[in-house]
Structure formats: structure tokens, C-alpha cells
Image: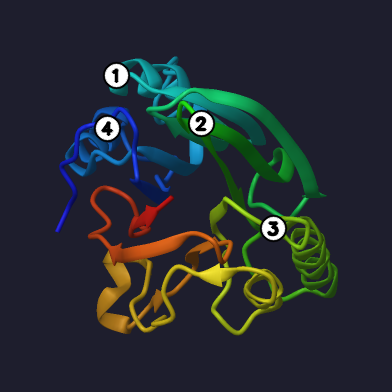
Amino acid sequence: MMFQEEKPKNPKTITILQWNILFTVPFEKTLTYLKTINADILCLQEVTSDSSFNPGVNIPDQLAQALSMKYYYEPCRYLKAGRWFIRDGNGIFSKFPILLKQSQILSQEGFEFALERKVLRKYVEAEIAISDNQTLTVATTHLSWFFPTRSHIQMREKEAVRLGEIVATKRERFVITGDFNASPGFSSVKNVSAFLRASELDYRKPTWVLKHFEKLGIRRRLDYAFTTQDLRVIRTEILPPGPSDHCPVLVKIAC
């Protein structure tokens, strides 16, 4: 089920969407799917400001305009191999005003298949005014994917430690989502779970589905949402992936 809710003047409940939109997907397909879901706040990864797949299209700008949302975008990666290139990052989009913005670098220069590259893994945070007298802090991240080398494993562990240190300081009215590129047993997920409550505890539903290899059983849980204890999670849904290879995670919370 997808939520079709209008923005309330004084919201008691809001919907937050976690989704890696996949940098190769045409912008119009991404936009169409997001309009169907109609969440109040979007936490998105692999959002390109320019790429060979959407040449000349600044997706953060155009997405915010098309959905009438405010946004905070942090560039994270530049990758180039021949004529193929992307400039992408993490974005938080909101129907409500964004009051404060900040980001922190978790790691840099991770391994990627590209001739030219600059890779930053970032924690991105926005304080959002969800009503006249209520704020909600929302954060998102996109952690490094697994590659079986010692240096890469050490870098992933560094990201997990730093992320745990950040969320340990969050006491109330806080939500973090992300593509952790990690199964539930990995340290990045455990470190966040040590301080925050998972939006749902049933991790059997995968969020990463390689459509061309689904028959081989390549399905993983990589995407998560966590909240502080004071926020009540009404429900969490894993939606169909749409045009991406990641399934959106839709969370409805009471504030």
C-alpha cells in the first residue's frame, strides 16, 4: 500500500521515504514513482547533479521543483570511465521548511570501478520544522559497498565507527535512514542499533534486488531506518523497487 496523504497544517504523523534511486535511471521514471508514493520527507541516495545517463539534468533541483519541496543536497561522488560519468550525492527533500543543515565525511577515496574518481561517503542531516512548534532532525547516508580487500574492509569499519559516534549524541526527535550496503549483522547496522530503534525488526524482506539475477537469489537487506525512542513508528513498508535496484522503505511515524 502507498500513502496518499495531503500535507497537514499541524502534523501529528508524517511519512519518510528511504530510497537509493540508482544513478542510471531516467529522471522522469524516478519522478513518476516518487509522485505515486507522495511521502512528506524523502531521503535519497545516488542523486545525480549531472551524468551521462541524465545529461545536463540537475536532479536535486528539478526534483524539488516538480514536487514543491525544499531540499538539502550534498555531492559525494565523481566517477568517470570513457564517456560514462556521474556526479551524485545524498539528498533530503521535505514538504516542510528546512531550518538547519550539516554534513560530515565518514570516509573518502573508496574503491570504485572508474578511471577517474573522487569518492566521499557522507552523513547528511537536516533539521525540519514539521509544525509551528515542532522540529524533527532527519539524516541519511550511503555507506561503501563491500569489496574483499583489507583496506576496503578497514574503511567500512571506520565508517561504521564514525556513524555510531554521531548517532550516539542523538537523544530525541531524530530519524536516520540510509543505504548501508550491509546486511543486518554488519557493524554499521549494529552500531546504529545500539543507540536507536529500528523502524522494524523483521529484516527478512530484501531491499536490494538485482532484477536480472533474481532467479539466482541475489536479494539482500541493505536499506534501513532508525528513530529515537520518543518517536512512535506506526508502520514500515518495503515497496516495490520501481525503476531502481533498491526497494524504497516507507516509514510512518507519530511525532
Give amino acid for label 4. Pro
Q: Are marks 4 and 1 in contact (CB under 8 Å)?
A: no
How far apart marks 1 and 3 lie (CA) works out to 34 Å
Q: Which label sits in the foreground, 2 or 4?
A: 2
Sequence-first tag of 3 and 4: 4
Q: Are marks 2 and 3 in contact (CB under 8 Å)?
A: no
Residue 189 position by quadrant: bottom right
- Residue 79: percent from left, percent from top: 63, 37
Residue 162 position by quadrant: bottom right
Mark 4 highlights which residue? 8
Mark 2 highlights which residue? 133
Q: Which label sits in the foreground, 2 or 1?
A: 2
Residue at 69% x, 76% y is 194
76 or 16, which lies in front?
Answer: 16
Mark 1 highlights which residue? 66
Task: For label 3, count other residues whose C-alpha is less than 10 Å away and answer few (under 14), some (14-19) or many (20+).
Answer: few
Residue 82 position by quadrant: top right
| Image-based side of 219 in relation to 147, left or right | left
- Residue 143: percent from left, percent from top: 64, 57
Task: For label 4, count other residues whose C-alpha is less than 10 Å away and answer few (under 14), some (14-19) or many (20+).
Answer: few
Q: Which label sits in the foreground, 4 or 1?
A: 4
Instruction: Locate the N terminus and report the quarter of the image it occupies.
Output: bottom left
Q: Which label sits in the foreground, 1 or 3?
A: 3
Residue at 64% x, 69% y is 146
Residue 171's tag is: 3
How far apart marks 4 and 1 lie (CA) works out to 20 Å
Sequence-first tag of 2 and 4: 4
Give amino acid for label 1. Ala
Q: Which label sits in the foreground, 2 or 3?
A: 2
